[in-house]
Image (spheres, rainbow, N blue to C red):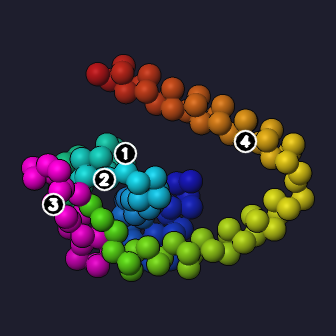
Amino acid sequence: MADLARRFGAAHDLDHSAARALLVLVAAEREGRDVTAGAIGHELGLSSASVTALVDRLVASGHLRREPDPHDRRRVLLRLEPSAVALGPAYFGPLAADMADRLEAFDEHDLDVVRRFLTAALEALVAHRERGAAARG
């Protein structure tokens, strides 16, 4: 995934952190979650100063905007601009089409096995990350 983010960033003149931040924001938007600069810092493992500089760059490039949280005026939410949203389909569209073509070779039973495997693998990764976070305090 990191290599995919790196290539996506290079194709759109974004550094690695900016590309990863946009991917995090796209996923959050798809899930209906709000994202703050602090959440980006946590997700990417960046300091507060680094996140501020990153968000400033993305705002200046027209990919991101800051919005006050309508429920908590102390919080500032990060929102994708249409220009950032448009980058994804242009870059990942061919990959999605290729994957869809290849998935046609699998029946529902095969896909169920893959779903169960990926769910278990993701649960293991999340548990590992949470254990590491708890150990760091």
Q: Residues within 10 Å of mark 1 (few under 14, many from 20)?
A: few
Name the residue rendered at 51%, 72% in the picture.
88
Indicate which disc, 3 or 4, sits on the residue closer to the N terminus.
3
Name the residue rendered at 54%, 68% in the picture.
7
Q: Which residue is mark 3?
A: 68
Indicate which disc, 4 or 1, sits on the residue closer to the N terminus.
1
* Residue 57, quarter of picture: bottom left
Q: CA distance from mark 2 to mark 1?
A: 10 Å
Q: CA distance from mark 2 to mark 3?
A: 11 Å
The image shows residue 114, relative to residue 62, as above or below, that is: above
Q: CA distance from mark 4 to mark 1?
A: 24 Å
Name the residue rendered at 41%, 59% in the picture.
29
Q: CA distance from mark 4 to mark 2?
A: 27 Å
Taking the view exactly as shown, the residue that stands out farthest to the top is 135
Q: Residues within 10 Å of mark 2 (few under 14, many from 20)?
A: some
Helix, strand, or loop for circle 1?
helix
Disc 4 to disc 2: CB gap under 8 Å: no
Q: CA distance from mark 3 to mark 1?
A: 21 Å
Q: Amino acid at mark 1?
A: Glu
Instruction: Indicate which label's residue lies in the foreground, 2 or 1.
Output: 2
Q: Is 124 placed left or right of 21 in the picture? A: right
Q: Residue 3: image x %, image y %?
A: 56, 58
Indicate which disc, 2 or 1, sits on the residue closer to the N terminus.
2
Disc 2 to disc 3: CB gap under 8 Å: no
Q: Which residue is mark 4?
A: 115
Residue nearest the observer in this picture, 93 or 46: 93
> What is the number of the mark on residue 43?
1
The image shows residue 42, relative to residue 80, as above or below, that is: above
Q: Residues within 10 Å of mark 3 (few under 14, many from 20)?
A: few
Q: Amino acid at mark 2?
A: Val
Instruction: Indicate which label's residue lies in the foreground, 4 or 1.
Output: 4
